[in-house]
Image (cartoon, grey):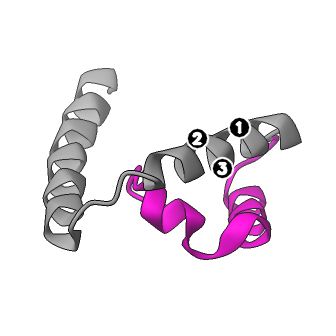
Amino acid sequence: MRLYNFNPYRITESGYEGFCSEMKKNTKGIRLETLKRLFSDAESSTRHLMPSEETTLLEERLLWYWQDYIVHEE
């Protein structure tokens, strides 16, 4: 969430190598297979083109839900 807001367009924006580099810098112990699967799933999701306004709204909604989740976990 912190890096890409769960947005597949953001994930795929810098390509696989950029995504892996960023995730490795920010996530301890993430496995290569996990990165491959996440990027592949993000690529699959981007095949459905959405207007940027819609993705922005979805990001905002997910941020609210994410914040609720964090509060719940604490």
Q: Is residue 2 visible?
A: no
- Judged left or right of residue 23, residue 70 is left
User: Residue 74: where, in percent of width, then height?
Assistant: 32, 27
**Residue at image mark 1:** 37
Spatial CA distance of label 2 from label 1 is 6 Å
Q: Which mark is residue 66?
A: none
Q: Are marks 3 and 2 in contact (CB under 8 Å)?
A: yes
Give the magenta range.
Answer: 3-29
At 46% from the left and 53% from the top, the residue drawn is: 47
Real-space Cα separation, disc 3 to disc 1, in angstroms: 6 Å
Q: Is residue 27 shown to the viewer in this render?
A: yes
Would you name the residue on which mark 3 appears? 39
Residue situated in front as seen by the camera: 62 or 53: 53
- Is residue 57 magenta-colored? no
Rendered image quadrant of residue 37? top right
Element under disc 2: helix
Q: Is residue 8 above or below residue 30?
A: below
Q: In the rendered image, which quarter is residue 14 located in?
A: bottom right
* Residue to which mark 2 is pinned: 41
Within the magenta stretch, is there residue 18? yes
Q: Amino acid at mark 3?
A: Phe
Kindly identify the residue that appears in the image at 66 percent across and 45 percent down: 40
The answer to whether mark 3 and mark 1 are in CB contact below 8 A is: yes
Percent x, y of residue 29: 82, 41
Q: Residue furthest top?
A: 73
What whole-number distance in Å separates the C-alpha atoms at marks 3 and 2?
5 Å
> Considering depth in this image, is 17 or 69 the residue closer to the camera?
17
* In the image: residue 59, left or right of residue 45: left
Assign a secondary structure to mark 3. Answer: helix
Q: Are marks 2 and 1 in contact (CB under 8 Å)?
A: yes
